[in-house]
Amino acid sequence: MTQPVFDILLEKLTYGGEAMGRLPDGRAVFVPFGLPGEQVRVELVEEKKGFARGILLEILKTSPERIAAKCKHFGVCGGCHYQNLPYEKQLTAKTEILRDQLQRIGKIENPPVKPIVASPLEWNYRNHVQFHLTAEGRIGFINSRGYSTLPIEECHLPEIGINTFWPDLQFESNEGVERVSLRSGQDEELMVVLESENPETPELEIEADVSVVHLFDDHPVVIAGESYLSMKIAERDFRVSAASFFQVNTRMAEKMVEHLAEKLPVTESATLLDVYCGVGLFSAFFARKYQRVIGIESSESACEDFAFNLDEFDNVELYEGEAETILPGLADRIDAPLHMIVDPPRAGIEKHALDAIININPQVIAYVSCDPSTLARDAARLINGGYQLVEVTPFDLFPQTYHIESISIFEKK
């Protein structure tokens, strides 16, 4: 059955990497890889009552801002969204999108969005990249339509060490391996992580001097080398295990640490509560400045890394478990003044965890977000709970993509 085709004018970029236009009936239509101001021909692939999604068939009038993409797979691969836009325009678009999300979802008038912090590297910035495998065992990414793996011959986002190594990875077939991750640490360390839903460890022969780890249900089996990498942030070493999360843009992680050090009003008598603390990236830089540091983390692997990375401090406590389970029990065990860092996953702060945060009543909350829509939702609840949004600073950890990191500072009124 033939899908409807329309000629439309694209108006603006939206969160998710799409450009928005209007259909003749007034519904919004979202189109990947288009740019504002372009007249395009689109084929609708999804229709809802209030909106539709389309694919770009032809650009009838090209934006003067459009540039040639660096990667041959751009437009087919789902990894990048903005290679057709100059970097300074990407930064402007992300700032506007963040502001729009805070206004539209959070109902925050004139949100105090500060200038975006640009990445020192526009390309080759990722210390961690996750590949999928085709049925034939070829390395690739999920395609832009989201339903199959696209074999690739190049990618310009991973660090040079990863990019030098991955083309030599060969698999007979996917053999139950769901994903293959490559991570790079300091001193040219490399780790290959094989993720599967099969407890049987796959066979993989690699002649290079790299660590190889099989992850099944987040439990590591070391095939070669070590189960962890060493990452260096602002002259401090961090152990990061195969199953542990770590910021993928090392240089921007340093800028975020510097920003938090500048914005948190540290006093020696205060307590810092680090929620979703991971391997201790933020706690490690504040443990000497606060009287007491409390970390909360649900990942067993990250908790083990946190304990290793902050072993030198005797004023640090760590609770392993879900934030919504642990936070309510801490309310009567923390004295003021209390400051808080929250760095939740993309889904934002879980509802009951946010209730507990408001009840605990920290004087200052630094909210590290990787999703402006869930940030806007949570910001509205914090404001209703008696907090003032002082400022929001976007950080571009992911050039060439739609993803937006930010740090928001909330103060108790």
Image (cartoon, rainbow, N blue to C red):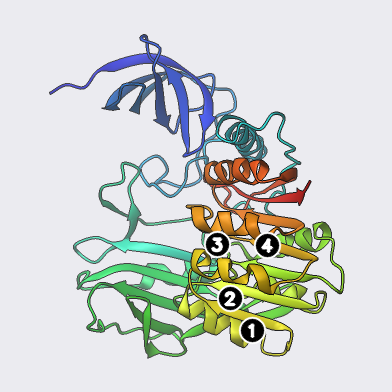
Q: Position of residue 109 (x, y in %)?
A: 69, 29
Q: Is residue 409 visible?
A: yes
Report the disc number at residue 258.
Answer: none
Q: CA distance from mark 3 to mark 4?
A: 24 Å
Q: CA distance from mark 1 to mark 3?
A: 22 Å
- Front residue of 235/104: it is 104
User: Residue pushed farthest top?
Assistant: 24
| 298 up-or-down from 47: above or below | below
Q: Position of residue 294 (x, y in %)?
A: 66, 75
What amino acid is labelled 1 in the image? Asn
Q: Where does label 2 land, which residue?
A: 279
Q: Earlier in the sequence, mark 2 or mark 4?
A: 2
Q: Is residue 368 left or right of residue 222?
A: right
Q: Residue at x 55, y 42 (%)?
A: 377
Q: Where does label 4 land, which residue?
A: 341
The secondary structure type at the circle numbered 4 is strand
Q: CA distance from mark 2 to mark 3?
A: 18 Å
- Front residue of 89/171: it is 89
Q: Where does label 3 land, which residue?
A: 126
Q: Earlier in the sequence, mark 2 or mark 3?
A: 3
Report the disc number at residue 309.
Answer: 1
- Quarter of the image with the N terminus in it: top left
Q: Earlier in the sequence, mark 1 or mark 2?
A: 2
What amino acid is labelled 4 in the image? Ile
What amino acid is labelled 3 in the image? Arg
1 and 2 marks in contact (CB < 8 Å): yes
Q: CA distance from mark 1 to mark 2?
A: 7 Å
| 80 up-or-down from 337: above or below | above
